[in-house]
Image: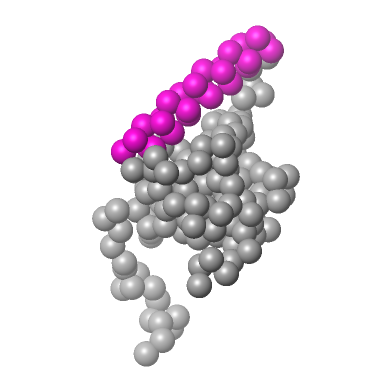
Amino acid sequence: MIEDLDVERVLIPVDFSDGARKAFYVGVKLATKLDADAHILHVEGPLHTMTDPVAVSEEVARLEEGVRRRLNALYERGGLEEVDRRRVFVEIRGGKPWMEICRYVEEENIGLIVMVTEGLSGVKHAIKGSMAERVVNRAACPVLTVKPDGYESNIEGIPKKFRQN
C-alpha cells in the first residue's frame, strides 16, 4: 500500500533533538521504500545578521560540516547502511524553521514531509506554538508527523465539547 504513494522527494527537517532523530530514521527508511530522494534540511537562526561575507561563509561551512558529521552518526546508529547516499541531499539554511521548510517544499517540489511533533501542550503550546502545526497548515504537500519517544496522549486536555462520545 505504501508503495502506491507517488512521492519522488521526501523532506526530513532535522534539529538533532531526540525526536528529530526518530523522524530522521522514519523519513529515510520511508524514502527508501518509496524509491524517493531524501532531502535533509537543517535550519539555523537567521544568518543575515552577520555583516561580514567571509564570516557568513565560514559559519555556513562550519554548520555543513557539523550537520554531515551528525548525519553520519545517525546513519551508523540507525542501521541505515543500505540507504543509497547518492539519493540523500543535505541543505542548511538560516531563518525561521517553519518558513524555510515550506519554502524548501516549493523550491524542490517535495512530495512528503516527515517531521517530529514537539509534544507541547497547554500553556507551553499557547506561548511557543508548534512548528509542526505551522508546517502542517502551510506546506504545499502532505506532512507525516512522528511522535517523540515518551509521548503521552492527553485526551483529558481536550475540552469536552470537542470530544466525540
For the record, the magenta segment spans 52-77
- Residue 152 sits in which quadrant? bottom left
Q: Nearer the viewer, residue 84 or 47?
A: 84
The residue at the point 42 percent across, 44 percent down is: 82
Say above or below: 126 vs 56: below
Is residue 56 covered in magenta? yes
At 58% across and 31% down in the image, what residue appears? 92
Nearer-the-camera pick, 46 or 144? 144
Among all residues in the image, which is located at the extreme right?
A: 107
State left or right for residue 60 relative to residue 26. Answer: right
Residue at the spot 51% in from the left edge and 67% down from the top edge: 2
Residue 126 seen in the figure: no
**How was the colour assigned to the protein in this rendering?**
one colour
Tally of numbered tags:
0
- Could you tell me if residue 92 is visible in this image? yes
Can residue 156 be found in the magenta stretch?
no
Residue at (58, 13) in percent of width and height: 58
Q: Position of residue 61 (x, y in %)?
A: 56, 18
Asked if 38 appears above or below 91 in the picture, the reply is: below
Q: Is residue 56 above or below residue 141?
A: above
